[in-house]
Image (cartoon, helix red, strand yellow):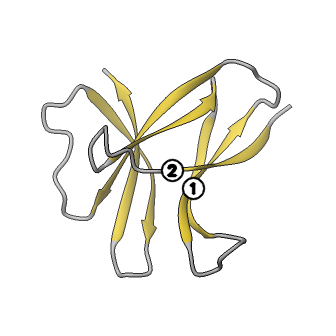
Amino acid sequence: MKTIYKYPLDINKDLGDTFCTVELPKGAIVRKVAYQASRKNMHTKGMYVWAEITPNKKETENVLFMVVGTGHVFGSGDAYEHKYIDTLFDDYGYVWHVYQSIKK
């Protein structure tokens, strides 16, 4: 049995301006990344990841994501393989590309 849950994608300043970690159930499959308005304030949008998971799975893992803007350089000499997930368009005209970063 599977289901899809939503998780916030918050940039972690300790990892650098382009990285964030999300605690997901082990084996989760990321299906979508998008902006979504808050239920409390429709003018506030957050970046979220939707992942297919096995409900009630106890074991979790921290999954590393990289968010880069169009034209930004990334991946040169780092210790990760970057798997493309999705592209997002914000309300200010910027375009962001989200990758899952996996240790080589």
Task: Give the mark nearer the N terminus: 1 vs 2.
Answer: 2
Give the x, y percent position of residue 70. 26, 65
Report the front residue among 52 and 44.
44
Query: Residue 43 appears in which quarter of the rendering?
Result: bottom right
Residue 2 drawn above or below residue 34: above
* Neighbour tally class for label 1: few under 14, some 14-19, many 20 plus, Cα within 10 Å: some
Q: Disc 2 marks which residue?
A: 9
In the image, residue 80 above or below residue 67: above
User: Where in the figure is residue 97, as x and y percent of width and height?
Assistant: 37, 57
- Distance between the Cα atoms at labels 1 and 2? 5 Å
Q: Give the residue at x 70% y 72%.
A: 40
Amino acid marked by disc 2? Leu
Classify mark 2: helix, strand or loop: loop
Q: Are marks 1 and 2 in contact (CB under 8 Å)?
A: yes
Rendered location of residue 53, percent (x, y): 72, 34
- Label 1, secondary structure: give it: strand
Farthest residue, direction right: 1
**Residue at numbered disc 1:** 48
* Image quadrant containing the C terminus: top left
The amino acid beneath tag 1 is Tyr
Vertical side of 84 occupied by 27: above or below: above
Left or right for 1, reference 70: right
Name the residue located 45 percent from the left edge and 66 percent from the top edge. Answer: 88
Foreground residue among 74 and 41: 41
Above or below: residue 49 compared with residue 70: above
